[in-house]
């Protein structure tokens, strides 16, 4: 472990140090941060192991006692309540939180060995492990290991939110029951719930079909962005909430004309054979993931707010993208928007539709307006690329490799793997 006293003086005390040497010191401190994070991950693995050991020992103890059932207090119930209360008090967490930790620890130790090993080695955080556990436990037992094997490599390189998107896609494609059947069953449970919160606030949540939820959220976001002016002091998040309440209570935002010309837009990528009804290959809903073929065909045919991106029958190539110019054509931009989904900088979740299409090799340096020289960067990371030593290169298939000012490299993968659009 390095400290400032072990290394060079900080920049304000070393005005003549070279930029290169200062970056080397920064690199060492970044390495130390990585090592500390890995140790924290290993500690979480040890905690999971001890919690599961406690669970097994407690169950063994109460089985030995074979106590009679009394007013619903079976040995199993008694064991669980004793375990939760004992551990919750010791670790200073609510019993509900401890109940989840007990279940997660059991899943790691007995159902998801690869995830537990990665956590033990320090290469995976506990939050990443929780994403894998949540998705895996929603699958039948026989599908959990294949799911884990498919998603675990990505878990070691993605942020938690990006892993959630990836895991949801893999889960949908791994589940042995068809998407159509599961959607039909799940739709029966659609609901709106009101949950009181603290300080005069409440949570209002809706459990509804994904394509309608996405369209509603996009419309709220677009209206809210239209209300952002130099004099507006509310954040975008606050504006979205206010717009939602205005629309639900009054039918329109309180600011006249705010909805004029605003229509919700959602991008749906549909395999051509699916659209023709001769294939059940899932489509992809931007911001969500795989959707069933019936829903894809319906929204593509009847919903004007949904933009359909059709893929080629045989090659997977998106149709009609070839043009010879600097500006990125709208159809190619849409193709890139599906591929990237978000800003491609490491860890960024800014939506691609709110980001810039960046030329990796600049146009004035003979860079092409082509899928393998373009990527979405949000304004913040676009500026960072041009004003600092951050850079990136295409490695093929939509995969990007970013290089930081300290010469560390980070790989980001496309949200959706799509075969190449033609070079312009």
Image (cartoon, rainbow, N blue to C red):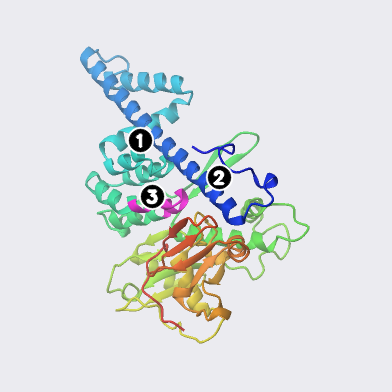
Q: What residue is rendered at 26% in x and 15% in y?
A: 69
Residue at the image position 40 percent from the left and 18 percent from the top: 86
Q: Give the CA distance from mark 2 to mark 3.
A: 34 Å
Gap between marks 1 and 3, in whole Å? Answer: 19 Å
Point out which mark residue 104 bears.
Answer: 1
Residue topped by disc 2? 204
Of the residues tagged 1 and 3, which is closer to the observer?
Answer: 3
Above or below — where is 296 with respect to 185?
below
For the record, the magenta segment spans 153-165
* Image x and y of residue 49, in percent: 32, 30
Crowding at dot 2, Cα within 10 Å, few <14 / some 14-19 / many 20+, comes out as few
Q: Are marks 2 and 1 in contact (CB under 8 Å)?
A: no
Where does the image place residue 377, in percent across and percent down from the top left?
Answer: 55, 65
Judging by the rendered image, the residue that carries numbered circle 3 is 156
Marks 1,3: beta carbons within 8 A? no
Q: Quadrant of residue 48?
A: top left
């Amino acid at each position: 472990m390095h400290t400032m006293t072990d290394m060079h003086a900080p920049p304000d005390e070393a005005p003549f140090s070279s930029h290169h040497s200062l970056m080397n010191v920064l690199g060492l401190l970044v390495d130390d941060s990585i090592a500390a994070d890995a140790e924290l991950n290993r500690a979480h693995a040890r905690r999971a192991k001890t919690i599961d050991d406690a669970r097994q020992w407690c169950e063994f103890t109460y089985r030995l006692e074979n106590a009679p059932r009394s007013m619903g207090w079976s040995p199993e119930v008694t064991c669980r309540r004793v375990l939760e209360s004992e551990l919750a008090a010791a670790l200073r967490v609510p019993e509900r939180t401890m109940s989840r930790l007990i279940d997660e620890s059991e899943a790691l130790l007995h159902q998801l060995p690869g995830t537990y090993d990665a956590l033990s080695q320090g290469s995976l955080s506990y939050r990443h492990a929780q994403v894998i556990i949540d998705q895996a436990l929603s699958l039948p037992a026989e599908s959990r290991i294949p799911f884990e094997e498919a998603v675990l490599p990505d878990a070691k390189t993605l942020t938690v939110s990006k892993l959630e998107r990836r895991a949801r896609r893999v889960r949908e494609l791994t589940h042995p029951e068809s998407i159509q059947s599961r959607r039909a069953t799940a739709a029966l449970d659609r609901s709106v719930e009101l949950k009181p919160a603290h300080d005069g606030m409440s949570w209002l949540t809706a459990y509804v079909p994904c394509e309608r939820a996405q369209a509603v959220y996009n419309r709220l976001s677009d209206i809210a962005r239209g209300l952002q002016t130099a004099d507006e002091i509310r954040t975008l998040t606050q504006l979205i909430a206010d717009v939602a309440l205005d629309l639900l209570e009054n039918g329109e935002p309180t600011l006249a004309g705010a909805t004029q010309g605003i229509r919700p837009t959602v991008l749906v990528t549909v395999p051509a054979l699916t659209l023709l009804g001769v294939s059940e290959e899932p489509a992809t809903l931007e911001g969500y993931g795989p959707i069933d073929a019936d829903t894809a065909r319906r929204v593509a045919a009847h919903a004007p707010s949904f933009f359909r991106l059709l893929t080629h029958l045989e090659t997977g190539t998106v149709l009609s993208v070839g043009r010879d110019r600097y500006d990125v054509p709208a159809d190619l931009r849409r193709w890139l928007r599906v591929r990237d989904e978000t800003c491609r900088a490491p860890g960024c979740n800014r939506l691609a539709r709110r980001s810039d299409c960046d030329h990796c090799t600049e146009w004035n340096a003979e860079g092409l307006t082509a899928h393998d020289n373009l990527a979405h960067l949000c304004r913040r990371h676009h500026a960072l690329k041009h004003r600092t030593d951050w850079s990136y290169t295409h490695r093929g298939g939509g995969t990007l490799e970013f290089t930081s000012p300290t010469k560390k490299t980070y790989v980001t993968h496309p949200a959706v793997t799509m075969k190449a659009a033609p070079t312009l």
